Image (cartoon, rainbow, N blue to C red):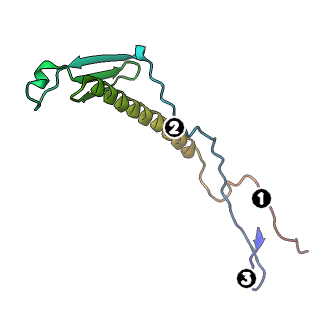
Amino acid sequence: MRISPFNASGKRHTSFASIFVYPELENEIVVDIEEKDLRIDVFRASGSGGQHVNKTSSAVRITHMPTGIVCSASRRNPNTATRTGHEILRARLHQREKQKQDDKLQEIHDSKEDIAWGSQIRSYVLHPTRW
């Protein structure tokens, strides 16, 4: 309760403040990919490229076994295709971890109770009492 400075008769007003404490989560997401968790398939790319696509296995499909995420890349150079496939996989794993963090925060946010009359935990009187 407080005495409003805008009320000429000095009546008491009730005010509410809602405070919620969130846990501090790691902002930095580190994606660690182990080679033993990957299945790498190399194949010949399709599409335009002339005879080069018929001679060189320049496409790669990388499967991350623990998560089942599959990404593929096709470049003129097989090493570049593999590097690009790894970058795509790293980005998808990063996105997956970020989504897990967001879901955890949303779960915490949803656990908040409604702000309503009678749901307050503590009451403070911030004015002198008049007897």
Residue 56 percent coordinates (x, y): 17, 20
Residue 50 falls in image quadrant: top left
Q: Is residue 9 above or below residue 13?
A: below
Q: Position of residue 121 (x, y in %)?
A: 73, 52
Quick one: SS at disc 2? helix
The span from disc 3 to disc 1 (Cα, nearest Å) is 22 Å
Name the mark nearer the viewer: 3 or 2.
Answer: 2
Q: Nearer the viewer, residue 1 or 26?
A: 26
Q: Nearer the viewer, residue 69 or 119?
A: 69
According to the picture, the residue beneath numbered tag 2 turns out to be: 101
Q: Residue at coordinates 21% horizontally, 29% vertically from top-left? A: 76
SS at badge 3: loop
Q: CA distance from mark 3 to mark 2?
A: 47 Å
Of the numbered discs 3 and 2, the one sitting upstream in the chain is 3
Mark 2: give few (<14), some (14-19) or many (20+) Cα within 10 Å: some
- Vertical relation: 68 (above or below) 104: above
Query: Which disc, if any, is residue 123?
Result: 1
Q: Residue at x 51, y 37 (%)?
A: 101
